[in-house]
Image (cartoon, helix red, strand yellow):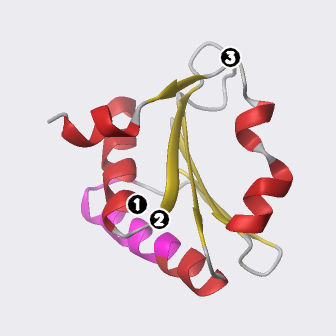
Amino acid sequence: MTATEKMKLVARHLDNKKAHDVTVLKITGLTILADYFVICSAPSTTQVKALGDTLEEAMEAAGEVLLKKEGKQGLNWILLDYSDVIVHIFYQETREFYGLEKLWADAEELPLEKILEED
């Protein structure tokens, strides 16, 4: 699966599972870490965990290997590393505090609506 296909699968899954404010940043050329960040939030730590768990299952079913998983501050932030796509699932207040979108302001933000409607 290409990085773009992987990113679309992640974004669609998170949107379908009612993640809040799903944001896709294309970071190709800005870092060697990955090609995309997919960032979302949830109103409770229970939902943060559920989003992480269901995404892991969906990616495993698609044959994608999880390279690293980190849970920060009692499920306030889960990071899932799929090599060229890194997923950040935040508790809402934690997302506002860290402001990854501001830190990566040079990245291209891809419109979620277009991602969801593409094949």
Looking at the image, can residue 98 be seen?
Answer: yes
Residue of label 3: 30
Which residue matches tag 2? 19
Q: Nearer the viewer, residue 94 or 84?
A: 94
Q: Amino acid at mark 3?
A: Leu
Question: Earlier along the polypeptide chain: callout 3 or callout 1?
Answer: 1
* Chain-order first, disc 2 or disc 1: 1
Which residue lies at the image location 26% right of the left edge and 43% below the top edge?
116
Kind of residue at badge 2: Ala
- Of all residues, the one furthest to the top in this rendering is 29
The CA distance from mark 2 to mark 3 is 26 Å
The stretch of residues the image draws in magenta is 51-64
Q: Residue at x 66, y 31 (%)?
A: 33
State how far apart marks 2 and 1 are (Cα).
Answer: 5 Å
Q: Position of residue 82 (x, y in %)?
A: 50, 48
Amino acid, disc 1: Leu
Q: Secondary structure at mark 1?
A: helix
CB contact under 8 Å: marks 2 and 1: yes
Answer yes or no: is residue 69 visible: no
Q: Residue furthest bottom?
A: 46
Please name the residue that numbered disc 1 is placed on: 14
Q: Which SS does the magenta portion mostly show?
A: helix
The Cα atoms of the two marked residues, 3 and 1, are separated by 25 Å
- Dots 3, 1 in contact, CB < 8 A: no
Query: Quarter of the image holding residue 78?
Result: bottom right
Q: Is residue 34 above or below residue 31?
A: below
Q: Is residue 24 above or below residue 94?
A: above
